[in-house]
Image: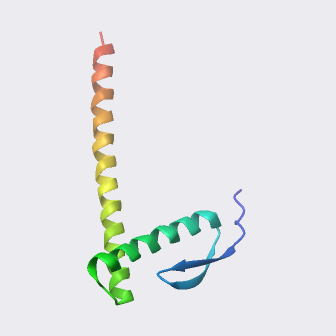
C-alpha cells in the first residue's frame, strides 16, 4: 500500500518574488521548475517590454502550454512511426 509522502515547504523565487510552496514531491525538482519559469518570465519581459506581472505570467503560461502541445504532438508522431515499423516487422515475420 502506498503511504502518503511527507509534505515539504520550499522557498522559491519567481520573477523577483518569493513564494513558500508546499510539495510532497522532490523539492529539488520544484526548485528547477521554478527556476525555469523564472527564466522564461524574465525572457518574455525583456523581449516584449511587458511590465505587468500578470501579463508576463499569462504569456509564460501560453509559451509553456505551446511547448507541451508540441511535445505531445511529436510524441504521437513518434508513437505512430513506431507502430508502423512494428507492424511492418510483424508482417515480415508472418510466413
Q: Of 3 and 80, which appears nearest the observer?
A: 80
Q: Quadrant of residue 21?
A: bottom right
Which residue is pictured at 33% across the width and 54% down the height?
Answer: 72
Closest to the observer, 88 or 38:
38
Residue 11 position (above or below residue 80): below
Q: Quadrant of the C terminus?
A: top left
- Residue visible at 34% across and 47% down in the picture: 75
Q: What is the residue that sits farthest to the top in this orientation?
A: 95
Give the quarter of the figure containing the N terminus: bottom right
Question: Which residue lies most toward the bottom here?
Answer: 52
- Determine which quarter of the picture holds residue 40: bottom left
Image quadrant where residue 3 sits: bottom right
Direction from residue 9 to residue 86 in the image, left or right: left
> Is residue 20 found left or right of 49 in the rendered image?
right
Residue 25 in sight here: no
Q: Residue 20 placed where, x, y %?
A: 62, 82
In the displayed structure, 28 sits above or below 7; it is: above
Q: Nearer the viewer, residue 51 or 73?
A: 51
Identified at 50% across, 84% down, the residue is 16
Q: Residue at x 27, y 79 (%)?
A: 48
Image x and y of residue 80, in percent: 28, 39
Does the rendering let one see residue 92? yes
Amino acid at each position: 500500500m502506498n503511504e502518503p509522502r511527507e509534505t515539504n515547504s520550499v522557498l522559491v523565487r519567481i520573477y523577483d518574488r518569493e513564494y513558500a510552496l508546499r510539495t510532497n514531491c522532490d523539492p529539488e525538482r520544484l526548485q528547477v521548475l521554478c527556476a525555469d519559469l523564472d527564466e522564461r518570465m524574465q525572457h518574455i519581459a525583456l523581449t516584449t517590454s511587458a511590465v505587468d506581472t500578470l501579463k508576463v505570467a499569462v504569456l509564460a503560461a501560453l509559451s509553456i502550454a505551446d511547448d507541451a502541445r508540441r511535445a505531445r504532438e511529436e510524441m504521437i508522431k513518434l508513437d505512430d512511426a513506431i507502430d508502423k515499423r512494428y507492424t511492418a516487422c510483424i508482417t515480415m515475420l508472418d510466413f
